[in-house]
Amino acid sequence: TQLVPQDNIGLSISMKEVLVGERRVIEIRDGIIPAAVKEGGKADSFYVAAVYDALKREVDKQKYIAQFNKNAPFTGRVNVVADKRIPYRTLMEVLYTAGQAELGEYKFMVMKNE
């Protein structure tokens, strides 16, 4: 069987939740990540363990595929879709956490209103 690569890992941030792919990873309130889900339960922490765990699973999957399919190298890229109302701090917390999961290249997606 052929191991087929996925596109870049998808990361969505809305005013209510953070999704990795199509899966909800954490619930957030009014665009703010609760301290309870951050490292040490500290509001000033940038590291969000549940987001890391979900992203790391996707990274590991992509690296595994890359071992067997040279046409699908691991790139460390993540597609970020974020609500324009998301606070800068929340975006930075999620991007910092993505960086910890070996995702250092971001592609921001803009959604136009219809």
Image (spheres, rainbow, N blue to C red):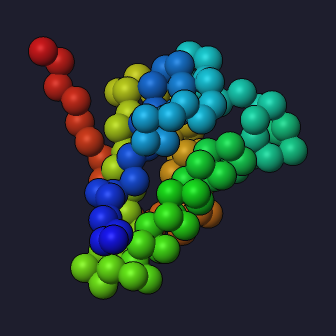
The image quarter in which residue 101 lies: bottom right
Q: Which percent across, then down, holds residue 49?
A: 72, 47
Q: Is residue 39 left or right of residue 88?
A: right
Residue drawn at (50%, 57%) of the image:
58
Q: Is residue 96 visible?
A: no
Q: Is residue 110 left or right of residue 78?
A: left
Residue drawn at (12%, 15%) of the image:
114
Q: Is residue 89 left or right of residue 66?
A: right
Q: Nearer the viewer, residue 92 or 105?
A: 105
Q: Is residue 23 visible?
A: yes
The image quarter in which residue 112 lies: top left
Q: Is residue 69 left or right of residue 12?
A: left
Q: Which percent across, then down, holds residue 99?
A: 55, 62
Residue drawn at (43%, 35%) of the image:
22
- In the rendered view, would you say 83 is above or below 40? above
Q: Which percent across, then down, holds residue 53?
A: 66, 52
Residue occupying the far left of the picture: 114
Q: How many marks?
A: 0
- In the rendered view, would you say 23 is above or below 46? above
Residue occupying the far right of the picture: 40
Q: Which percent across, then down, holds residue 94?
A: 55, 45
Q: Nearer the viewer, residue 84 or 75?
A: 75
The image quarter in which residue 73 lies: bottom left
**Where, quadrant-wise, is the N terminus in this rendering?**
bottom left
Q: Nearer the viewer, residue 11 or 1?
A: 1
